[in-house]
Image (cartoon, helix red, strand yellow):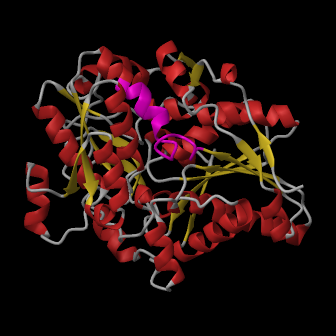
Amino acid sequence: MTQTKIQLEENEIPKQWYNVVADMPNPPTPPLGPDGNPIGPEALAPLFPMALIEQEVSGERWIDIPEKVREMYAIWRPTPMFRAHRLEQALGTPAKIYYKYEGVSPAGSHKPNTALPQAYYNAEAGIKRLSSETGAGQWGSALSLVGKWFGLDVVIYMVKVSYDQKPFRRSMMHTWGAEVFSSPTDQTEAGRTILEKDPESLGSLGIAISEAVEVAAANKDTNYSLGSVLNHVLLHQTIIGLEAKKQFEKVGDYPDMIFAPCGGGSNFAGVAFPFFADKAAGKKIQLVAVEPTSCPTLTKGTYAYDFGDAIGLTPLMKMYTLGHDFMPPGIHAGGLRYHGDSALVSQLYHEGLIEAIAVPQIATFEAGVQFAQTEGIIPAPEANHAIRACIDEALRCKESGEPKTLFFNLSGHGHFDMAAYDSFFSGELEDFEYPEEDIQASLRNLPRVG
């Protein structure tokens, strides 16, 4: 057997998103304002529509997916899940390997899962324009696409290093009608502040967030839209794991371990959180977030209150952070170059309920190439992190003889990342192990709380 495809029917698209807050053993830590006191929903009103704010603070286990959103999900959902027989054979492992393929969306990644409902709720609230940031361009592409569907103008601040590395993702955004700027820019106070300090700045997600938030806060017809980190974003992505649970039921199997890339946290949360509900009910399962060694937020960061952006415009969130002014190297997995992690992911990791590992860049591309040559799909650099961790575990199963069931989220294809693969093949890629002293220097600038 070469490959098993496990597909759902259109009528099996979930009707509700799953909210992990309902099954967490402790209440989520609250976001804080500049005075160090917890903020209320009203503090988010200048940036988000009330429907999303309600989801952000909700403790309800199940939240209904609007029928219009569910109908539009059907453009590409349910997404297929595969058993990777050829990869298993190549590794000589007794492990069973499954993956959920989110690259079938029009934008080529999992990001439309939240871009679609965010655009829907903003359009319903009468908003005319959305501003946002993007790293490697998957989020910017997704928001540009759905913005056009709902008649919203979209402005994207794309991290400079990715803006230069991934020109065709820029082309996608332009094709769908968005304005795209290389961040940091000279158009915002945040961008000018960064450029004064470092005219050659490669940019970061934290900087791009600062620019996008500034634009939204200054214009009444504009709201901010975020592609990861926040509770409502993770909520929307749980459609991945909810579908996967149905697909495992169809083949009478269940994963022992789940792997997903982790930058801000939505990719990992989307596939892992619905299975956390089983873990909370006593089921034995390991949920593993995989990050780059060059941006080791969970594995080397500090659990503390910090800003979500580089300048300090956002509320303070308790999360694993490398410091809001942390500047990661220009790795090709641009979606993982973020200084912090979702507050929900961070709290679960801090309480020992999920796991995290960091993997180096070259090893991830080695895994991506092996996967492409066996399974046929060329993965995005971010997805290569989950593949690397899954392959490593499969090889450990080979050594021990343990027949585990392994599952990872293939969050997007790499068709617009071929320059990164060319760099790998030519030996130009480097491994970055971020120096401990640089991390500690950045952490010294954490905001003082209390």
Q: Foreground residue, 173 or 301?
A: 173
**x and y percentages locating residue 133 in the rendered image:** 29, 47
Instruction: Name the quadrant containing residue 252.
Output: top right
* Residue occupying the point 47% across, 15% down: 68
Horizontal side, residue 244 vs residue 55: left or right: right
Horizontal side, residue 79 vs residue 252: left or right: left
Looking at the figure, which quarter contains the C terminus?
top left
**x and y percentages locating residue 56 in the rendered image:** 41, 26
* Residue occupying the point 53% across, 27% down: 73
* Residue occupying the point 62% across, 47% down: 354
Q: Is residue 232 magenta?
A: no
Instruction: Name the quadrant containing residue 373.
Output: bottom right
Q: Foreground residue, 423 or 43?
A: 423
Q: Foreground residue, 303 or 213?
A: 213
In the image, farthest residue toward the front: 175
Q: Foreground residue, 299 or 87?
A: 87
Which residues, given as a range, are shown in magenta? 102-119
Looking at the figure, which quarter contains the N terminus?
bottom right
Can the viewer see residue 446?
Answer: no
Horizontal side, residue 200 vs residue 99: left or right: left
**x and y percentages locating residue 255 in the rendered image:** 78, 45
Q: Is residue 391 above or below residue 355?
A: below
Horizontal side, residue 321 vs residue 195: left or right: right
Can the viewer see residue 325?
Answer: yes
**x and y percentages locating residue 31 in the rendered image:** 33, 34
